[in-house]
Image (cartoon, helix red, strand yellow):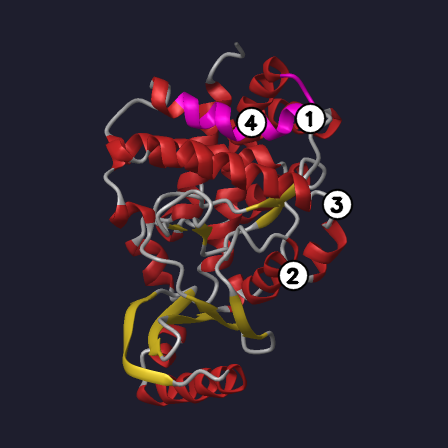
Amino acid sequence: MTVELWTSAAFHEEATVWVAEQLGPLGVRLSGESAHPHTRPWSTAVRYGSTAGPVWFKANGTGTAHEPALLRLLGERVPRLVPEVLAVSLDRGWSLTRDAGPVLREALDADESWTAWEGIARAYAAAQVELSGARDDVLAAGVPEVSPASLPELVRGLLAELSGRPTDRGGLDAEQADRLRSGLPRFDDWCDRLASAAVPDSVQHDDLHSGNVCWGGSVASARVIDWGDASWGTPLATLLTTTRSLAFHAGVAEDAPQVLRVRDAYLEPFTAYADRDELLRLVGPACGTGHVGRALSWRAALQDAPASTEADMEYPVRAWLLELLDVLAVPAG
C-alpha cells in the first residue's frame, strides 16, 4: 500500500538521500529538520531545510505519476507559473522544488485575496494561452487528454464502468445510469460547441484553488503547485473548481460580484480568440464537461488506494457524475 510505504522510515531515508544528492551539485546542503505535512493515496510531500532555504520533495502514485514530467515542462516553458524545479526522477515519480512561500489560503484571508486572485487568474490564463501549442510535449509527459474531442467517449466509459458496479461500491443505480444516458446528447452538444470554438485546448490544472497557490507576497511571485490532476483539454474548465472554491471559502454565492471579477480576469487573455460574450457562452459547457474531468482525476488518484478509502471519501467519482446529472437537468439559458 502506497501510504504505508511513504510513511515508512526506509522510504524517508531513501528520499532524504536522493534530495541530498540532487542538491549537492548546486552547492546546497540539507540543514535542520524535515517535515512531512501530509500523505495521501495519490502523493506525499516532505519539506526539507537547506542552506539555500526550504525545498520540497514530492512522490506521486500511479495515477498522478505524470506530475514530475509536467512540472519540468512547465518550468522550462512558463517558469513564472511554477516553483523552481530543482530535480525530477521520472521513473519513480519524484520531484524536488524550491519553496515558493505559504499557500494563499494561509497567507491571506479570503476577503483580502480578491485582488490577488484577479491577478493570479489572469497570469494563469496567459500561461495556458502560451502552452496551447505544446500538446505533443504535454501528452508525451503522460498527461491525460480530457478534451472536447475525447470527452464523449470518456463519459461513456465511466458510465459503463459505474453502471456495472454495485452502489455500495460507488456504482450508479439503474435510474441514475438511465438519466445520465439520456443526458448524453446534451453533453455531446457541449463538446461540439467547445471543439468548434476558437479557444485552443491547453493544460488545465483542474484543482486551482487557494490551497494550491503559493503566495510570495505579490502576483508576480505567486506560483501554482500540485499538478497531479492536470489534463489536456479546454482551458475554461478551470473555472469549475476555482470559482466554486473561491465562493465557498469566502462564504459568498458563486455569482457574487467578486467571484465574477475573478472569472472575467481569467477570461481576459482568451479575448485574443473570442469576444467576451462568446467566452461567457462557453463557460457553461466547459464547466459542465469539467465534471467528467473531475471524476476522471479522482478515478486516477485513487487507483492505488484500498476500496475503503474511496468509501470514506463518499465515492467522489460517482459524486461528480451525479453532479453532472444535476447540471444536465438545468434548462438551457
Q: Earlier in the sequence, mark 4 or mark 2?
A: 2
Task: Give whichever of 82, 238 is nearer the camera.
Answer: 82
Task: Give whichever of 99, 249 is nearer the camera.
Answer: 99
Residue 171 visible in the snapshot: no
Q: Earlier in the sequence, mark 3 or mark 4?
A: 3
Residue corresponding to mark 1: 272
- Indicate the secondary structure of the residue bearing disc 3: loop
Distance from disc 3 to disc 2, alpha carbons, whole Å, reads 16 Å
Task: Give whichever of 312, 149 is nearer the camera.
Answer: 149
Q: Earlier in the sequence, mark 2 or mark 1?
A: 2
Distance from disc 1 to disc 3, alpha carbons, whole Å, reads 15 Å
Type of residue at label 1?
A: Ala
Q: Is residue 262 magenta?
A: yes
Residue corresponding to mark 4: 267
Residue corresponding to mark 3: 133
Extent of the magenta region = 260-275
Q: Quadrant of residue 210?
A: top left
Q: Nearer the viewer, mark 1 or mark 3?
A: 1
Residue 9 position within the rendered picture, expressed as x and y whole percent measured from the top left: 31, 88
Residue corresponding to mark 2: 142
In the picture, measured across the screen, residue 110 lies left or right of residue 62, that is left
Residue 283 visible in the snapshot: yes
Distance from disc 4 to disc 2, alpha carbons, whole Å, reads 27 Å
In the picture, measured across the screen, residue 34 lies left or right of residue 331, that is left
Q: Residue at x 65, y 17 (%)?
A: 275
Task: Give whichever of 152, 257 is nearer the camera.
Answer: 257
Callout 4 crowding tier (Cα within 10 Å): few <14, some 14–19, many ≥20 = many
- Indicate the secondary structure of the residue bearing disc 1: helix
Type of residue at label 2?
A: Gly
Pick the quarter of the image with the N terminus. bottom left
Type of residue at label 4?
A: Leu
